[in-house]
Amino acid sequence: QVQLVESGGGLVQPGGSLRLSCAASGFTFSRYSMNWYRQAPGKERELVAGITSGGSTNYADSVKGRFTISRDNAKNTVYLQMNSLKPEDTAVYYCNVRSVLYGDRWGQGTQVTVSS
């Protein structure tokens, strides 16, 4: 079955960096676009970044120039490098894969807290 397992969250000071990882299994990872979403308390879940099977990327305006999404198909893993973190980046970050075959699948989420 499809499984997505996020890791790498934590507490970081403003201006700091974190790298999130999402290990995928149960499907042919290299064939699918992968996404990172986040949800802050009291807010709706929002798309942060996406990467296609071919490596094309897209970002929310709020993270452009600070976050970088990448993938390693040999390791079935997608990453989110987050630099210059701001308090407003505080949220639970979720890995996502969406397809006709598997539907909408999510990981359990990893908490990112940006605070001094």
Image (tube, grey):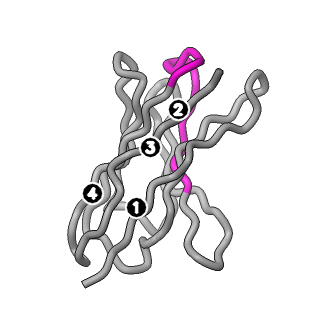
Q: Amino acid at mark 1?
A: Lys
At a point 49% along the width and 28% down the height, the residue shown is 24
Helix, strand or loop at label 2? It is loop
* Distance between the alpha carbons at the discs numbered 4 and 1: 15 Å
Query: x and y percent of residue 102 in the render?
Result: 73, 26
Left or right: 96 in relation to 49: right
At a point 35% along the width and 21% down the height, the residue shown is 75
Helix, strand or loop at label 4? It is strand
Query: x and y percent of residue 38 in the render?
Result: 54, 60
Asked if residue 82 is positioned above or below residue 85 in the image, the reply reads above
Question: How crowded is the residue under tag 1: few (<14 C-alpha within 10 Å), some, or many (20+)?
Answer: few
Which is more N-terminal, label 2 or label 4? 4
Q: Are marks 4 and 1 in contact (CB under 8 Å)?
A: no
* Disc 3: which residue: 6
Q: Amino acid at mark 3?
A: Glu
Q: Are marks 3 and 4 in contact (CB under 8 Å)?
A: no
Which is more N-terminal, label 2 or label 1? 2
* Disc 2: which residue: 52
The residue sitting at the bottom extreme is: 116
Left or right: 56 in relation to 82: right
At a point 62% along the width and 42% down the height, the residue shown is 106
* Distance between the alpha carbons at the discs numbered 1 and 2: 17 Å
Left or right: 29 in relation to 77: right
Asked if residue 5 is positioned above or below residue 27 in the image, the reply reads below
Label annotation for residue 18: 4
* Disc 1: which residue: 64
* Distance between the alpha carbons at the discs numbered 4 and 2: 22 Å
